[in-house]
């Protein structure tokens, strides 16, 4: 099965761009009202860290990414020592958000995102992959205004102050109320509220993944039109459009016997399976708790193709694979998320076929 690749920055860029992969959701609500007051209060009392609740902190980060253009280099590291970096240009104009991300390590790749439209340029293959993403797996994973239910599963604590890429920052900790999600230590630029550094922390307090700007130009003169022109320059590339079809879990015969606390279904698609015929599709069912995302990929089991059941980890992202028995034919589940393994197991245990 071909699973859409999680961009190394999708957990971070998301928050930074508050759009994009990402789950590596473009916000539809303009910032105003209480959110604007929060930003103004921060600017007029820059020597004090705002005393806000979980939802208001997320609104502040969300609004900052929608109001400010920036250019920077950010680096992602994981506990195992793996490192990746990228250069990002982000511009905004009203409700339009556009960005370019150049991967600086590994095979060359440039990704453009214009609201929900994403183009990924692969120079070595002379291919451009086009898709529309509603959920880009970004942190915070806001699909609009933050859901007040987030506060039922996370608490917030002001840690203090810091500096990231030369900017003074407020440092807070988002702590889970249960063992089904990770905690986060967050650095936000003091005046704007832009997220500049993020650590994902496990239940033992260990940092399992860190993303941070090593260099940042805030309110940089990045023009929407210039990025749009670069995004549209596909001459010499072969365009490959993602074959996805919106559906519902019920229509595909799937359900959860019991919900996983805090996680709400956000989308469900049928995706083409690699080079297989268009008749063969993988079902992708995505959930979020407002910060973390979990995606369930389901396809008919194939003993010749599917590997052994198991669990893999890369930083804060875990992947669980499992064979699901069914009288009419077994299924292969691949569950992926920035959550502890027990959360993926809870989804796997609850997943069931709809009685017919």
Image (spheres, helix red, strand yellow):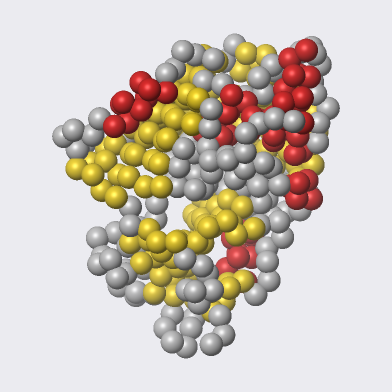
Picture coordinates of residue 140, whole percent (x, y)? 62, 39
Q: Is residue 10 above or below residue 39?
A: below
Q: Residue at x 77, y 31 (%)?
A: 34
Q: Quadrant of residue 355?
A: bottom right
User: Viewer-proximal residue, 262 or 161?
Assistant: 262
Picture coordinates of residue 329, whole percent (x, y)? 42, 83
Q: Is residue 21 left or right of residue 199?
A: left
Picture coordinates of residue 101, whole percent (x, y)? 40, 29
Q: Residue at x 75, y 39 (%)?
A: 55
Q: Residue at x 76, y 25 (%)?
A: 38
Q: Quadrant of residue 243?
A: bottom left
For residue 163, say whether it is visible: yes
Q: Quadrant of the N terminus?
A: bottom left
User: Viewer-proximal residue, 114 or 341?
Assistant: 114
Q: Is residue 320 left or right of residue 272?
A: right
Q: Is residue 175 left or right of residue 95?
A: right
Q: Is residue 273 left or right of residue 159?
A: left
Residue furthest right in the image: 51
Residue furthest left in the image: 236
Q: Quadrant of residue 7?
A: top left
Q: Residue at x 43, y 29 (%)?
A: 99
């Amino acid at each position: 099965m071909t699973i859409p690749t999680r961009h190394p920055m999708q957990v971070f860029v998301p928050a930074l761009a508050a759009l994009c992969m990402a789950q590596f959701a473009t916000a539809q609500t303009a910032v105003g009202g209480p959110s604007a007051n929060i930003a103004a209060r921060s600017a007029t009392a820059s020597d004090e860290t705002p005393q806000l609740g979980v939802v208001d902190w997320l609104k502040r980060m969300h609004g900052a990414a929608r109001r400010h253009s920036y250019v920077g280099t950010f680096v992602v590291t994981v506990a195992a020592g793996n490192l990746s970096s990228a250069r990002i240009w982000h511009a905004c104009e009203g409700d339009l958000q556009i960005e370019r991300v150049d991967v600086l390590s590994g095979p060359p790749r440039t990704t453009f995102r214009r609201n929900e439209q994403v183009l990924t340029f692969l120079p070595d293959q002379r291919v451009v992959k086009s898709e529309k993403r509603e959920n880009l797996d970004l942190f915070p994973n806001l699909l609009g205004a933050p859901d007040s239910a987030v506060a039922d599963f996370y608490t917030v604590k002001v840690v203090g102050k810091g500096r990231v890429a030369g900017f003074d920052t407020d440092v807070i900790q988002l702590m889970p109320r249960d063992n089904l999600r990770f905690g986060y230590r967050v650095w936000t630029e003091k005046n704007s509220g832009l997220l500049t550094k993020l650590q994902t922390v496990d239940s033992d307090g260990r940092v399992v993944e860190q993303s941070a700007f090593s260099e940042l130009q805030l309110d940089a003169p990045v023009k929407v039109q210039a990025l749009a022109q670069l995004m549209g320059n596909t001459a010499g590339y072969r365009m490959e459009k993602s074959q996805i079809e919106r559906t519902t879990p019920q229509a595909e015969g799937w359900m959860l016997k019991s919900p996983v606390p805090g996680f709400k279904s956000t989308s469900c698609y049928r995706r083409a399976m690699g080079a297989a015929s268009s008749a063969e599709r993988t079902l992708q069912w995505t959930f979020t708790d407002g910060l973390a995302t979990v995606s369930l990929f389901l396809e008919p089991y194939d003993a010749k193709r599917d590997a052994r059941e198991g669990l893999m980890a890369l930083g804060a992202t875990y992947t669980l694979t499992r064979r699901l028995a069914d009288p009419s034919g077994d299924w292969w589940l691949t569950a992926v998320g920035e959550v502890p393994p027990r959360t993926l197991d809870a989804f796997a245990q609850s997943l069931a076929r709809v009685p017919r």
